[in-house]
Amino acid sequence: MLTAQQYSPNLHSTKGLLVALVLSLPLGITAGTVLRSVSTREVPQAFREPALVRPELEPQIVEIPLHPVRFRPAGSFSLQDTVVDAPLVTLASRKSLLIMRHQVSAAEYERCVAARACKAANRGAAAADFPAVKVSWEDASTYAAWLSRETGKTYRLPADEEWIAAAGSRMPENAVIAGSAKNPAARWLAEYEAEANRDPAEIEPKPLGTFGVNEYGVADLAGNVWEWTDSCFIRATVSDDGLSYQTTTVNCGVRVVEGLHRAYLPNFVRDARGGACSTGNPPSNLGFRLVRDEP
Amino acid sequence: MFTNTERLAGAVLAICALSAPALAADPAKLPHEKVALVAPPFIHPHEQATNSAPKVIEFELTVQEKPFVIDDQGTTIQAMTFNGSIPGPMMVVHQNDYVQLTLRNPSSNTMAHNIDFHAATGALGGGALTLISPGEEVVLRWKATRAGVFVYHCAPGGSMIPWHVVSGMSGAVMVLPRDGLKDRNGKPLRYDRAYYIGENDFYVPRDEKGNYKKYNSPADAYADTEEVMRKLIPTHVVFNGRAGALTEKNALKAKVGERVLIIHSQANRDSRPHLIGGHGDYVWETGKFDNPPARDLETWFIRGGSAGAALYTFLEPGIYAYVTHNLIEAVELGATAHFMVEGEWNDDLMKQIQPPRPIAEEKKTGSLN
């Protein structure tokens, strides 16, 4: 009977306020502002309310053009019971790769922490435009899952070969280490020598962009933040001709980390400076960037 | 019964006997030899067994107060050093030589310093006779009566003593038996190489965020540092003054078949050295060579305030880690050194019979149950 236009409640009286409240409810619904409880349980993508998708969380993406990747796969390889370098393999890509221009920043990671989906990093507050560091593979995977839910897109850690494809000329040199069937120590000494001669990376994280971009426009590769990949540590036997290999064991408790050099770290480690699995220069900082899968 | 001549001769002899101490050589009249010290982990050239008669060996130490980086994160302490290194340099003499030390405290320093030689006798190891202010120098001579490896350190008095020591002001001397090292049967033991590894415990204060603090001078650092010291838990335990100082490009070298002498000193705190992959063939754990060396040790004990010595002949090539076997201190606090050893592998001592492979039983049944 009464429409809002015909009746202007006197808001200066309590009765007026009550009337205004009662009238505002139907108005509220038609205006489209919805009051509903925010659920923290996981909502499958297909049922995600379009209104809840947060495109402002989408990171800057670089498209890596199709190109074959020539590299030595990660893991421990042996040829006739002697540990050897992984063989050089060439992978052709079937579709272009969409990868974040920057590593996940401290600010971005903090949003996940504020949403109570990610564990707070155990460090002092980092400036927003610095990379998120002291992050484990578990932390990175949790972040990727959260970002996927929030954006309605599929974000995940890159596989080792995807990181290498995006790295282009910044791919670290995985030195060819001389080995000897009769003398296992020859390889240990050669590996140690190679690690000892690497220039140590600076310790303190730097603002995103400090280490420049590569030929694809991807920033800060092989800077002083080592990046988690999703790839697991494998053991493999190399064929007699040295050209192919067969995986015998997979250990996903240890994941491949890429940066100035390749490292293998337990998936729960946030800080490798103590050395973890590697001798020589351990990763100065552990962070990550994500790839996006298109359907 | 005695003639007058005989009585006179007897009297002269008696007088000579009474002044017998004058018959011993005046050390000032012995040959003097100047020796230039080298920075650890290396040791100045020296004979192991010597045919020469006792000498006075002259050394010089200059105290340097300076900022000193102790880890890869750039943690910096206001250090106090002998000759600029942590630890101070190793001095080698033989039993019954004399050490004549000129100790200098340049005007650029801010505090008084001195030196206490654990190998010396009297005057607080020499500390009471060597306390010098900035701008002063002093010369002390002491007789190396006991054979062994011994700590030296600064000890200027009261609370300054522990503080100067945990600021880096210690080193070691080696007093070799004149006929060199021997096993329990008197058989000579000669080394092809010798390294001096000085271990230090540091106590670096942290700010509210947990980051290590930096100070502009030792005086500024003192109050905060003393608070950490009194809790008795070091923030760093390192060899040669810095975490990783004896690794990578500075890893210690040896060859299969070489016998290496490893001298280890800790002026303040207990340590338990262990050579990962090796042993102590002959170990003077307490560091004193008149005691027969222990054989075949896996890990030995350096009591705080002492030095010890171990001999090992490398038998396999590869990388060895030399650690204190509190592994938390070794890995997390910095107490690790590396040896790179070249040579041929000996399958008899160790051989990998079957490289890692999937468990056969699990492959068949899917599990071990």
Image (cartoon, coloured by chain):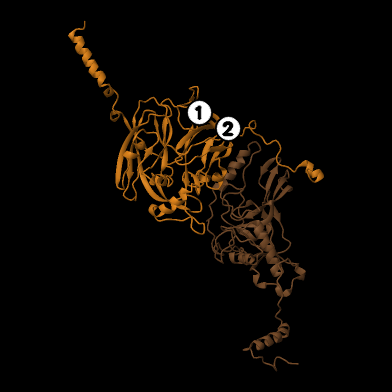
Chain colours: A brown, B orange
Q: Position of residue B237 (x, y in %)?
A: 50, 45
Nearer-the-camera pick, B161 or B23: B161
Residue A3 vs A228, above or below: the answer is: below
Residue B50 vs A46, above or below: the answer is: above
Outermost residue on the top side: it is: B1
Task: Answer with left or right where residue B248 lies relative to residue B158.
Answer: right
Pointer 1: what residue? B293
Nearer-the-camera pick, A56 or B237: B237
Q: Position of residue A77 (x, y in %)?
A: 69, 46
**Residue B186 seen:** yes
Who's the residue at 72% across and 49% down the image? A250
Pointer 2: what residue? B315
As shown in the figure, which amino acid type bears the numbered disc 2? Leu
Task: Answer with left or right where residue B198 lies relative to residue B296.
Answer: left
Q: Are tags 1 and 2 found on a single chain?
A: yes
Residue A289 bears which disc, if any? none
Q: Quadrant of the C terminus of chain B?
A: top right
As shown in the figure, which amino acid type bears the numbered disc 1? Pro
